[in-house]
Image: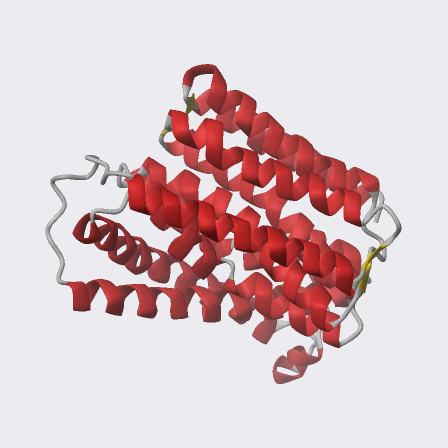
Amino acid sequence: MISSLISPAGILLGQGFPFLSILCVIIGLVGVAWGADRFTDGAGALARRMGVPQIVIGLTIVGFGTSAPELFVSLTSALRGQAGMALGNIVGSNIFNVLFIVGISAAITPIAVARSTVSKDIPWAVGAAVLLLLLCLDGKLSRIDAAVLLAGMAAFFVYTLRMARHGKAETEDKEARPMSMLLCVVWIIVGLACLVVGSQIFVSGASDIARQLGVSDAVIGLTIVAGGTSLPELATSVVSARKGQSALAIGNVIGSNVFNILMILGITGAIQPLRTAGITMVDFGMMIVSILLMWQMSYSRFRVSRGEGCLLVVLFAAYMTWLVVHA
């Protein structure tokens, strides 16, 4: 296995071993882990200072911020003519967000889900996923389709602003040490920068290794790139769950999924129309089924238990295995 991992970066070792690629993966993971801790501290403190529900912060600032890597990767991939990677990154990221991130977070600490999140927020993620499937039935995402997605993003912004206006600050994490507004902003910016840069370094190294193994752009987009660009969401949600900020954890995933489809594919498709290019109905179907499954789990007892979290992770592992087998 090791002998098959060949990369141009391995010239430094004289034997073709991808030393730089592996180093990028390690550095990226460290940067993401540290950045997530700073980012969640700043975002949680900002929510408390502004009297805004954490779910709103999760749906907007955190959701948008942790989706920055997906925006960068999808846009640059589309401009380079790698439509499979551009679309696969988003579809794969949304699957990763729900099955792996929510699964791991719940397996570590059961996630409490507010009734309003179940009845109002998760349906947005379901609707966005179904809308993307319908728009891609003809095998492409045109500029008109992109305009529809951006219109949906505008509606989502209006919805979250109304939530912020009428909502009340949540009482969780009351014992947290107060943080100045300046420090909140600094930690959000510094943490976000580490998340974005770290995830890009990770994706660069991991994608280099995958290409040397002969993996297609679509599969790389659905797996390595999707997982790499979702590292900010993974780190942010796990850290939030451990700190008892369950609304931030679940809001991060929901907000990121909505942003990924409505805004990122909306912007990318408006600049460069896309074709599905290797993204199958199985992939679109898994994206929709995963969010529906999380919705059902949340609706049953307004929480995602450890057992349910483990089930989500197992389903994710099964899907990854299917991708590898059919690559």
Q: Residue 298, how many percent across, how many down?
A: 47, 24
- In the depicted structure, whether residue 10 falls above or below residue 118: below
Residue 81 image-quadrant placement: bottom right
Q: Residue at x 36, y 42 (%)?
A: 163
> Residue 26 vs residue 127: left or right?
left
* Residue farthest right in this picture: 138
Q: Residue 80, how many percent across, how many down?
A: 76, 76
- In the depicted structure, whether residue 176 falls above or below residue 221: above
Q: Residue at x 64, y 72 (%)?
A: 18
Quadrant of the snapshot with the N terminus: bottom right
Q: Residue 217, how many percent across, how many down?
A: 78, 62
- Is residue 50 in view from this perspective? yes
Q: Residue at x 61, y 84 (%)?
A: 12
> Residue 85 vs residue 293: left or right?
right
Residue 243 image-quadrant placement: top left
- Is residue 220 in view from this perspective? no
Q: Residue at x 67, y 74 (%)?
A: 76
Residue 10 image-quadrant placement: bottom right
Nearer to me, 28 or 174 = 174
